[in-house]
Image: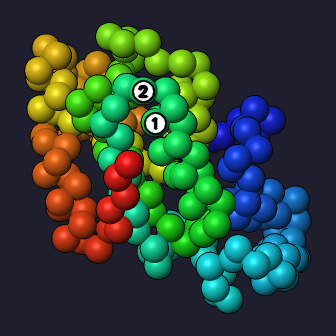
């Protein structure tokens, strides 16, 4: 469960409104959330989507560089898309090459706290992170070396291809 008080401002739209509304007042609050989201120009449509429903939008991001500015841009884009579409999107970030370190329990390259915090926060909001097994093997690491929420995939590039075949839009910097 996300720690709502510690979440950064960059992820503040649909999921927080929906969950906060449900906790505060049940069905009556849900009706208010629907009305509020109808006024929100960034809403992805007129239908209310609940967590767990099949989202209309699918997107996969490639994270393959260790550069902090690059990582900030990718994660910032993930947050912006999440804010725009709320619960009507499924986002996957596939990390491989030098980008894999953001998903390691003990990174072999420096990972700034701000990057780590963004990854943890985005995960709290349902963003899925995939870690390339091929890259891990090259580093003499395995599935046990990645963060608990990250999903191990055999080959990051193949993961990107397979997700695209399933309808995910592919984003690379």
Q: Are marks 1 and 2 in contact (CB under 8 Å)?
A: yes
**Horizontal arrangement in the rendering, residue 36 relative to residue 107 (left or right):** right
Q: Is residue 44 visible?
A: yes
- Residue 60 picture location, percent across and down: 36, 57
Count of marks placed on residues: 2
**Horizontal arrangement in the rendering, residue 169 relative to residue 125 (left or right):** left
Considering the numbered disc 2 on the image, is that residue within a helix, a strand or a loop?
loop
Q: Residue at x 42, y 27 (%)?
A: 67
Q: Residue at x 54, y 18 (%)?
A: 112
- Residue 55 picture location, percent across and down: 47, 74
Query: Badge 2, how many Cα within 10 Å: few under 14, some, many 20+?
Result: few
Q: Residue at x 11, y 23 (%)?
A: 137
Residue furthest to the bottom in view is 46
- Residue 12 picture location, percent across and down: 74, 53
The residue that disc 2 covers is 67
Where 115 sits versus 28, above or below? above
Where 20 sits versus 105, above or below? below
Q: Residue at x 45, y 73 (%)?
A: 57
Considering the numbered disc 1 on the image, is that residue within a helix, a strand or a loop?
helix
Where residue 4 sits, quadrant-wise, is: top right
Q: Residue 111 — which label?
A: none
Where residue 168 sits, quadrant-wise, is: bottom left
Where 120 sits versus 38, above or below? above
Split into 4 quadrants, where in the image is the N terminus? top right
Q: 16 or 72, which is in the foreground?
A: 72
Query: Badge 1, how many Cα within 10 Å: few under 14, some, many 20+?
Result: some
The residue that disc 1 covers is 70
**Horizontal arrangement in the rendering, residue 153 relative to residue 65 (left or right):** left
Q: Is residue 34 visible?
A: no
Whole-angstrom CA distance, mark 1 to mark 2, is: 5 Å
């Amino acid at each position: 469960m996300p720690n709502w008080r510690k979440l950064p401002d960059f992820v503040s739209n649909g999921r927080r409104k929906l969950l906060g509304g449900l906790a505060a007042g049940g069905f009556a609050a849900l009706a208010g959330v629907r009305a509020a989201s109808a006024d929100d120009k960034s809403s992805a449509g007129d239908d209310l989507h609940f967590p767990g429903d099949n989202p209309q939008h699918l997107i996969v991001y490639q994270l393959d560089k260790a550069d902090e500015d690059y990582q900030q841009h990718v994660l910032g884009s993930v947050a912006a898309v999440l804010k725009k579409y709320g619960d009507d999107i499924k986002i996957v970030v596939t990390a491989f090459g030098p980008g894999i370190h953001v998903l390691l329990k003990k990174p072999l390259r420096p990972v700034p706290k701000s990057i780590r915090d963004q990854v943890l926060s985005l995960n709290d909001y349902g963003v899925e992170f995939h870690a390339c097994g091929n890259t891990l093997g090259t580093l003499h690491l395995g599935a046990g070396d990645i963060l608990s929420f990250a999903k191990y995939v055999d080959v990051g590039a193949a993961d990107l291809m397979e997700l695209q075949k399933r309808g995910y839009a592919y984003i690379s910097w």
